[in-house]
Image (cartoon, helix red, strand yellow):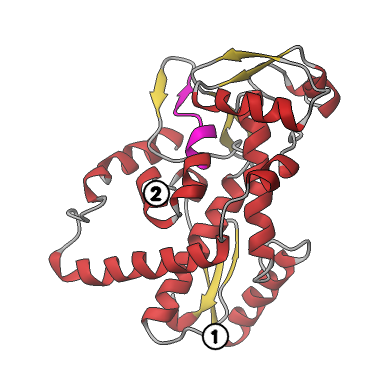
């Protein structure tokens, strides 16, 4: 499933930025959706702040490319003598040295992330990518910054998932709300699409800390998606992108005041927008 998502995204390469894979009659509408979504996302994000990034960075609870799950506690990560990072992410080393003067570490350059699986449910596993240490640290900072801005519009608050649950209940009772379930959503955010929708001062950092390649058991694959599960900002970024697109559709068809609820890839919108 991980590789099939990549194959599907690779087929879309030619559609950015000229949308040439879409029928001519849909180009105007699709361009309008992307334009409005970019406006909405730009308004929501505002200006990027280096100071806020440095104060937002942290380590997540999972394994990294240099530390296994049994040593994934923050104490091991902050205590490591060497942190792994992709070449583009090493530019943050001097920033982190200034922001955390007592935190001393060397940097080892790696190509990218490493593929593994975790249980999804009793029957299937979920594919995730284990990220390099330094990438993960800054990814989490970017994710926290995006989350903070989404919370201003009521998304990703501590109890936000309850709103989606209530919307799903209302939809099942009277059909007013549609819940949209996307398949493999976290593996489907095309890098070029995100470049179109996210302003450049934010985008440069999202790209700097993403893993451009992932190591599978039999090969190394260059990624077309911007990130996958395992990246420290994937959940917040997919929420932002889906919210921007849903809001754009709402504005385009004249229902701009309708409530749009997004929690990761859990989307709830009025049925007339579905």
Residue at the image point whose x is 42% and y is 40% from the top: 225
Q: Where is residue 2 in the image (x, y as percent from the top left)?
A: 45, 35
Q: Position of residue 254 (x, y in %)?
A: 40, 87
Q: How many marks?
A: 2
Quadrant of the image occupied by residue 147: bottom right
Q: Does the magenta stretch include residue 157?
A: no
Looking at the image, residue 69 lies above or below residue 254: above
- Secondary element under disc 2, as helix, strand or loop, is helix
Q: Which mark is residue 176?
A: 1
Q: Where is residue 119 in the image (x, y as percent from the top left)?
A: 66, 36
Span shown in magenta = 206-216
Figure quadrant of the N terminus: top left
Looking at the image, residue 26 lies above or below residue 4: below
Looking at the image, residue 148 lies above or below residue 73: below
Q: Where is residue 167 in the image (x, y as percent from the top left)?
A: 64, 76
Proximity of marks 2 and 1: CB atoms separated by less than 8 Å: no
Furthest residue in direction front, as rendered: 98
Figure quadrant of the C terminus: bottom left
């Amino acid at each position: 499933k991980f590789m099939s998502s990549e194959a599907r995204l690779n087929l879309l390469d030619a559609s950015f930025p000229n949308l040439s894979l879409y029928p001519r009659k849909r180009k105007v509408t699709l361009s309008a959706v992307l334009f409005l979504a970019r406006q909405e996302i730009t308004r929501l994000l505002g200006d990027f702040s280096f100071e806020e990034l440095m104060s937002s960075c942290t380590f997540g609870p999972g394994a990294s490319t240099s530390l296994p799950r049994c040593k994934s506690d923050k104490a091991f990560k902050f205590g490591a003598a060497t942190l792994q990072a992709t070449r583009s992410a090493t530019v943050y080393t001097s920033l982190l040295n200034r922001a955390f003067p007592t935190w001393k570490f060397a940097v080892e350059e790696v190509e990218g992330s490493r593929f593994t699986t975790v249980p999804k449910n009793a029957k299937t596993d979920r594919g995730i990518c284990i990220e390099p240490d330094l990438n993960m640290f800054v990814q989490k900072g970017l994710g926290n910054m995006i989350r903070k801005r989404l919370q201003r519009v009521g998304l990703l608050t501590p109890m936000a998932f309850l709103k989606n649950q209530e919307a799903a209940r209302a939809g099942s009772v009277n059909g007013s709300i549609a819940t949209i379930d996307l398949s493999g959503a976290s593996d489907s955010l095309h890098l070029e699409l995100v470049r179109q929708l996210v302003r450049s001062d934010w985008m440069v950092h999202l790209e700097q800390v993403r893993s451009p390649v992932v190591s599978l058991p039999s090969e190394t694959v260059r990624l077309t998606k911007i990130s996958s599960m395992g990246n420290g900002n994937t959940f917040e970024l997919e929420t932002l992108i889906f919210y921007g697109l849903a809001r754009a559709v709402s504005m385009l068809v004249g229902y701009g005041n309708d409530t749009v609820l997004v929690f990761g890839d859990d989307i709830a919108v009025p049925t007339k927008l579905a």
